[in-house]
Amino acid sequence: AQSVTQLDSHVSVSEGTPVLLRCNYSSSYSPSLFWYVQHPNKGLQLLLKYTSAATLVKGINGFEAEFKKSETSFHLTKPSAHMSDAAEYFCVVSPLGGNAGNMLTFGGGTRLMVKP
Amino acid sequence: AAGVIQSPRHLIKEKRETATLKCYPIPRHDTVYWYQQGPGQDPQFLISFYEKMQSDKGSIPDRFSAQQFSDYHSELNMSSLELGDSALYFCASSQVAGKRHEQYFGPGTRLTVT
């Protein structure tokens, strides 16, 4: 069994300030972890992924996330927020296995708002 | 680069009607996944197919069925539609042959049931 908890449903930051979106996971298996972003009325875009290689993962648009097994966390950060970062962000877990059809389990989402 | 294609992008149906959603995966991707995202909710996994065989099943209602065809495209068939079926339906694809495969999502089909 696997689950994901995003600790904040809404996060508001000012443009140019750091972003922190928190995510904790639970998985019976060694997990793959992802962050997806969804802009209004758009599809889901992969920001970054962790798959048991380096624990600090760099993604697109300046985002990065650190896998901390001891804390079962995979928080998403960005040093400086941009207005275009305003969107819904989903932390996602998938079991790390060789089987086909590994379904993704989504967290509840965090809506990031960026103030000018 | 080619992405996942979903059609139609928008669909309006009445209660008790049927609907068919189509998904065309990225070339050389052999696995297709279907997700349902209700208003203000996170996506929920419905069903997946690998090499034309069902591989995982999630919270898919019995009124829904799906299949993957020889060209790897997939169709989600929805019958006896209910108001609660109104949602954004995403298809994703991945290439299982590689390890640590990530899923690439299509733009979604927005289904409105009136």
Image: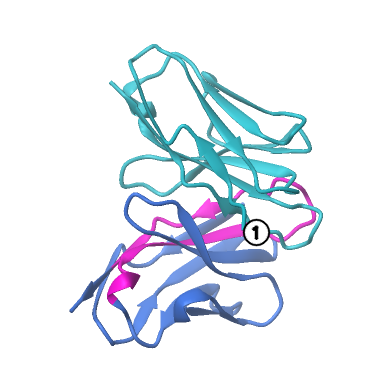
Chain colours: A blue, B cyan
Q: Residue A116 falls in which quadrant of the image? A: bottom left
The residue furthest left is A116
Q: Is residue A95 magenta?
A: yes
Q: Does residue A61 sit above or below A36 in this rendering?
A: below
Image position, residue A106 (x, y; %): 49, 54
The residue furthest front is B1
Q: Quadrant of the N terminus of chain B?
A: bottom right
Q: In this orientation, which residue lies closer to the viewer: A71 or B54?
A: B54
Stretch in magenta: A83-112
Parent chain of label 1: B
Q: Does residue A11 sit above or below B24 in this rendering?
A: below
Label 1: element kind: loop
Label 1 neighbour load within 10 Å: few <14, some 14-19, many 20+ = many
Left or right of B80 in this view: A32: right
Left or right of A99 in this view: B110: left
Q: For residue B7, say whether it is visible.
A: yes
Residue in view at x 74 percent, y 52 percent:
B95
Q: Does residue B107 sit above or below B85 in this rendering?
A: below
Image position, residue A47 (x, y; %): 51, 68
Image position, residue A112 (x, y; %): 30, 68
Q: Quadrant of the C terminus of chain B?
A: top left
Residue in view at x 34 percent, y 15 percent:
B15
Residue in view at x 37 percent, y 79 percent:
A20
Residue in view at x 62 percent, y 60 percent:
A27
The number of callouts visible is: 1
Q: Is residue A3 magenta?
A: no
Judging by the rendered image, the residue that carries numbered circle 1 is B102
